[in-house]
Amino acid sequence: MKAWFWKGMLAAAISFSLLSGSIGKAAQQQQGQEQRGIEGVWDIIVTGVSCATGAPLFTGRVIHMFIDGGTMTEIADRSNRSAGLGTWRHLGGRNYSAVHEFIEYSAFGPNTFNGTAVVAREIELSKNGDEFTATATSKVFDKNDNLINTGCATSTATRFE
């Protein structure tokens, strides 16, 4: 009788251990997915808009890489500019901000420095962390660092995997 009791207790302990382990693992995976951050590579469609009216002006494509620790890189679909370098930070929840700078070249020569542009972006991740929407403002400076233009944009992004 005692042997039967202990075998039953052992079987129950093993079953409970396996069950709680798989439940805990599933909960951990679900929690990890919900908390997925911005780190990674993103394919982004940018729409330049009028800052005054929000009317669309142009559409372009960029790729951002958000790196653990708060740095980022960007490449764009325009040949007259450098890659962008910048920083990002987590604001809380699914909200982030990022700022990056790139060099503008003259359309008349690949080695003619025209100035720089600084883009500040407010980002909201989707619940699953595989998409985001963002709004951005930009400031364009000439080669003497004088502000010559400002701009606004919206964007949608999907995680590249």
Image: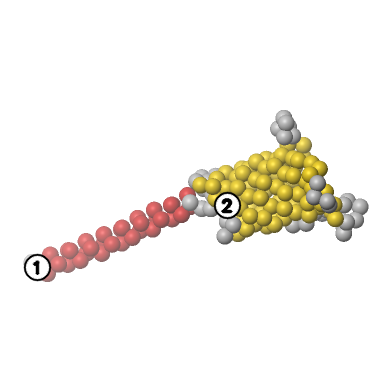
Whether residue 141 is situated above or below residue 50 in the rendered picture = below
Determine which of the numbered discs, if any, sits on residue 89 in the image: 2
Which residue was labeled with disc 1?
A: 2
Tell me if 29 is positioned left or right of 65 in this view.
Answer: left
Residue 145 image position (x, y, % from top left) = 80, 50
> In this view of the protein, which residue sits in the foreground, 84 or 142?
142
Q: CA distance from mark 1 to mark 2?
A: 62 Å
> In this view of the protein, which residue sits in the foreground, 79 or 22?
79
Q: Element under label 2?
A: strand
Q: Residue at x 62, y 58 (%)?
A: 71
Q: Quadrant of the C terminus?
A: bottom right
For badge 2, the amino acid type reads Arg
Tell me if 59 is positioned left or right of 70 in this view.
Answer: right
Tell me if 101 is positioned left or right of 129 in this view.
Answer: right
Residue 119 image position (x, y, % from top left) = 70, 47
Can residue 86 be spotted in the picture?
Answer: yes
Q: Residue at x 61, y 53 (%)?
A: 88
Pointer 2 local density, CA inside 10 Å: few below 14, some 14–19, many at least 20: some
Q: Determine the image quadrant of residue 156.
A: top right
